[in-house]
Amino acid sequence: MLDTGPERSFDDLTLLASHICQTPVALVSLVDEDRQWFKSKVGLDADQTPREVAFCAHAIVDNRLLVVPDATHDPRFADNPLVTGDPNIRFYAGTPLVTPDGHGLGTLCVIDMQARQLTPEQTAALEAIGRQVVSQLELRRKILDLEQQEAELRQARREALKANEAKSTFLANMSHELRTPLNAIIGYSELLEEEAADSGVEHLTPDLGKIRSSGRHLLGLINDILDISKIEAGQTELFLEPFDVAGVVRDAAAAVASLVGQNDNQLEIDCADGLGEAV
């Protein structure tokens, strides 16, 4: 809030405090380490004063309404340059602006150049308006928190989109690089099957068929990966296609048959009668 521009929501409360307390000056004063800065002001030209001469600094320390009927008779302020010189403060009343978590930020104060007192009604009104100032400060803090969270979410979304693009690019490149050697394996296995049949070594044909079948299965998996990328990018169309269930089961069994046999295990396939194509 420090060094931000005027805001009507604060200016209205400051003006209301000035009218109710019948003082020429009213301020929303925020205190930091070295100064008090006026977020809103009525009847005063200065934007800030050093903290060491600030009445508000005393109100924050006491954490309660501070009333100074005549500053010239108060040893804390009698030598204060704001009392001995311009603006010649005599009367001061300030209610601390304390957040719900107990942080004292400053005061809502009213000032007069004549010694005086507030009525009980004016005192109660000043404290009530001070609570409204705190509500406005808390609202600003929540708005800033929401804006920061929104900015973080936007940044996270940008990073997620960037990561997704990188993943899609990687999958596409990987699939392309794997497809070429796989197609070569499938093609050579088919050629070897034909040569085995022509050369009279048909006993090699089943193993070569397993190589071809496994290569096609792996190629299908790679194509599925590409399809996932297309789905995420919204560039794919889904359609129904029949497939041979029994054939899929046989291919899966053939792919692991050699591993099963190494450990003297047995793999049995039990397909229901009439098991055929499914969609």
Image: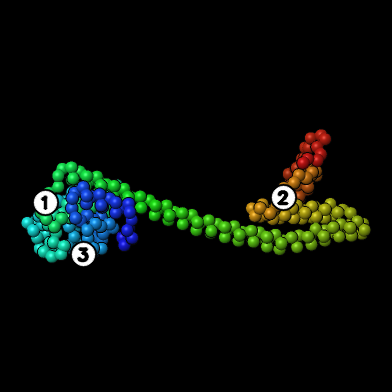
Disc 3 versus disc 1: nearer the observer: 1
Q: Amino acid at mark 2?
A: Glu
- Nearer to the camera, 223 or 144: 144
Is residue 41 visible in the rendered structure shown here?
A: yes
Q: Amino acid at mark 3?
A: Pro
Number of other residues with Cα within 10 Å of mark 3, as a class: few under 14, some 14 to 19, many 20 or more: few
In the rendered image, residue 121, in percent from the top left (x then y), is placed at 18, 42
Q: Which mark is residue 116?
A: 1
Q: Quadrant of the N terminus?
A: bottom left
Residue beneath the point at 59% across and 57% down: 164
Q: Please report whichever mark, 2 or 3, sits nearer to the chain's N-terminal start.
A: 3
Quick check: 277 above or below 186? above
Disc 1 versus disc 2: nearer the observer: 1
Residues at marks 3 and 1 touching, judged by CB atoms closer than 8 Å? no
Q: Residue furthest left?
A: 73
Is residue 104 visible in the rendered structure shown here?
A: no
Q: Amino acid at mark 1?
A: Arg
Residue marked by disc 3: 50
Residue beneath the point at 14% across and 51% down: 67
Residue 38 falls left or right of residue 244: left
In the rendered image, residue 125, in percent from the top left (x then y), is placed at 22, 44
Residue beneath the point at 14% across and 47% down: 118
Residue marked by disc 2: 237
Q: CA distance from mark 2 to mark 3?
A: 70 Å
Local secondary structure at mark 3: strand
Q: CA distance from mark 3 to mark 1?
A: 25 Å
Residue beneath the point at 68% across and 62% down: 173
- Nearer to the camera, 51 or 125: 125
Number of other residues with Cα within 10 Å of mark 2, as a class: few under 14, some 14 to 19, many 20 or more: few
**Quarter of the rendering containing residue 216:** bottom right
Residue 136 falls left or right of residue 208: left
